[in-house]
Image: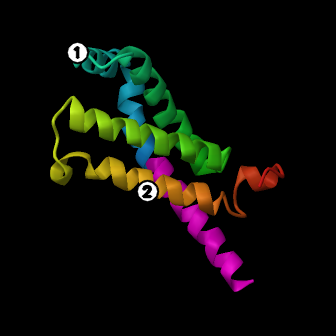
Amino acid sequence: MVFASYSDVAALVGRVALGALFVSHGWPKIKDITKPVGFVKGTGWPGGAAFAVLFTLLEFFGGLALIIGLLTQIVAVLFVLEMIATTVFSKTKLGKKFSLGYELDLAYAAFALVLAFLGPGAWSLDRLLGWA
């Protein structure tokens, strides 16, 4: 039982921390969606506008969902996929190196993967709704 309570605390802390990080990245983009769309389109990335809009919505609303523990594992997997895509983008289109480049994207991907495996924990809407 002690491990269950520790994992529930870990899930809560992880969800809130990662969710807050993504909300803080998504909020400026959602306030003016034309900036991220224009930036990504300007790099020539295939489907850049669509990806920019989808990733902006995921970062803001997905971050909120993590904070409250709603669809936690699904959102976490979507964040893993987004971070893989942004890592590829950073390396291929922006020419960034690992250090001071795309290491943060990989850290977020690892963090999200941990949440995908850990689950939402006891203090979540997923648990309250009987989804976890």
Dot 2 alpha-carbon crowd within 10 angstroms: few under 14, some 14 to 19, many 20 or more: some
Task: Quadrant for residue 64, please give it.
Answer: top right
Majority SS type along the magenta span: helix
Cα distance between the residues tagged 1 and 2: 29 Å
SS type, badge 1: helix
Q: Quadrant of the N terminus?
A: bottom right
Disc number at residue 110?
A: 2
Disc number at residue 68?
A: none
CB atoms of marks 1 and 2 within 8 Å:
no
Residue under pointer 1: 42
Q: Nearer the viewer, residue 33 or 115?
A: 115
Rendered residue at 68%/63% (across/down): 121
Q: Earlier in the sequence, mark 1 or mark 2?
A: 1
108 in the magenta segment: no
Magenta-tinted stretch: 1-20
Q: Is residue 131 left or right of residue 82?
A: right
9 in the magenta segment: yes
Q: Position of residue 24 (x, y in %)?
A: 39, 42
Residue farthest to the bottom? Answer: 2
Rendered residue at 22%/15% (across/down): 42
Q: Is residue 86 left or right of residue 115?
A: left
Q: Quadrant of the C terminus?
A: bottom right
Q: Position of residue 114 (x, y in %)?
A: 53, 60
* Amino acid type of the residue that numbered disc 1 sits on in the rendered structure: Gly
Rendered residue at 30%/51% (across/down): 104
* Amino acid type of the residue that numbered disc 2 sits on in the rendered structure: Ala
